[in-house]
Amino acid sequence: MTTDATTPAGARALYRDGLIAPTTGHAPGFTQANLVILPRDWAYDMLLFGQRNPQPVPLLDVTDAGSFRTTLAPDADLRTDLPQYRVWRDGELVDEPSEITGLWRDDLVSFLIGCSFSFETALLDAGVPVRNIEQGRNVSMYRTSVDCRPAGRLSGPLVVSMRPIPAGLVATAVQVTGRMPQVHGAPVHVGEPAALGVRDLAVPDFGEAVDSEPGDVPVFWACGVTPQAALMASRPPFAITHAPGHMFVTDVPDDVYRQP
């Protein structure tokens, strides 16, 4: 097996062997996914939350209860093949392990959600720089003052990822990402962070601060960490997610989710 991060199987093998690192730039050209795992008792609420909030929560796959396999990478194991997970109890973060085999239960349902890392290759192909990749950093993510549409017991604020984009290339970034709605699509906001209730770009709620270059404009996309904010607000008794920026690397080429 290939054991480098340039292919999906190789990247997953590295994570399974203990590599903990943000997955931005890994397996370029292949779709990455956010992960939310909830007991079956909460699965309908999560499914409805995704249906009502498709831009931050674009559902790519939902497993049967107890299954740790996904059609997005049939040979992968959702319990071991992400670089880092988060464990939640009553809405509180209690652990960030590198595998969750010992926590697995037969009633757990996994939700695979589109990730903006999947359009970074398309941005680069279009000549749009991706500063977080250039700087070797996790993307910056912020909790906003915009509420998602509630669904059953789940509610919470929209979370956005931010990428500094040269002003002259913002239109290109909008066009490129707008063709990929299943991985968050076009930006939800361009420009002044305060319009989203974001106070300080240097202090992200998740991920790392990414430096802007002269002439850059902050561009904000809906983010798949939004369900984690909903878990904090809604406090289900048990949940597992990916650690922000530490995604599930699928076998699906990005082009599958790119509209003509």
Image: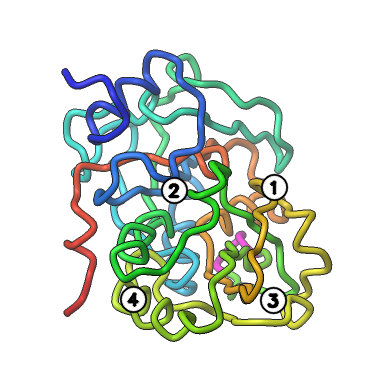
The amino acid on which the numbered mark 4 sits, given as a three-letter code, is Val
Which region is colored magenta? 151-155
Q: CA distance from mark 3 to mark 1?
A: 19 Å
* Residue depicted at 44% across the width and 48% down the height: 34
Q: Is residue 121 above or below residue 196?
A: above
Local SS, label 1: loop
Q: Which residue is mark 2?
A: 34
- Nearest the viewer among 217 and 190 is 217
Residue 149, numbered label: none
Local SS, label 3: strand
How many C-alpha atoms fall within 10 Å of the one at disc 1: few (<14), some, or many (≥20)?
A: some
Q: Which residue is mark 3?
A: 146
Residue 235, numbered label: 1
Which numbered disc flags the more N-terminal residue, 3 or 1?
A: 3
Q: Which residue is mark 4?
A: 176
Which numbered disc flags the more N-terminal residue, 2 or 1?
A: 2
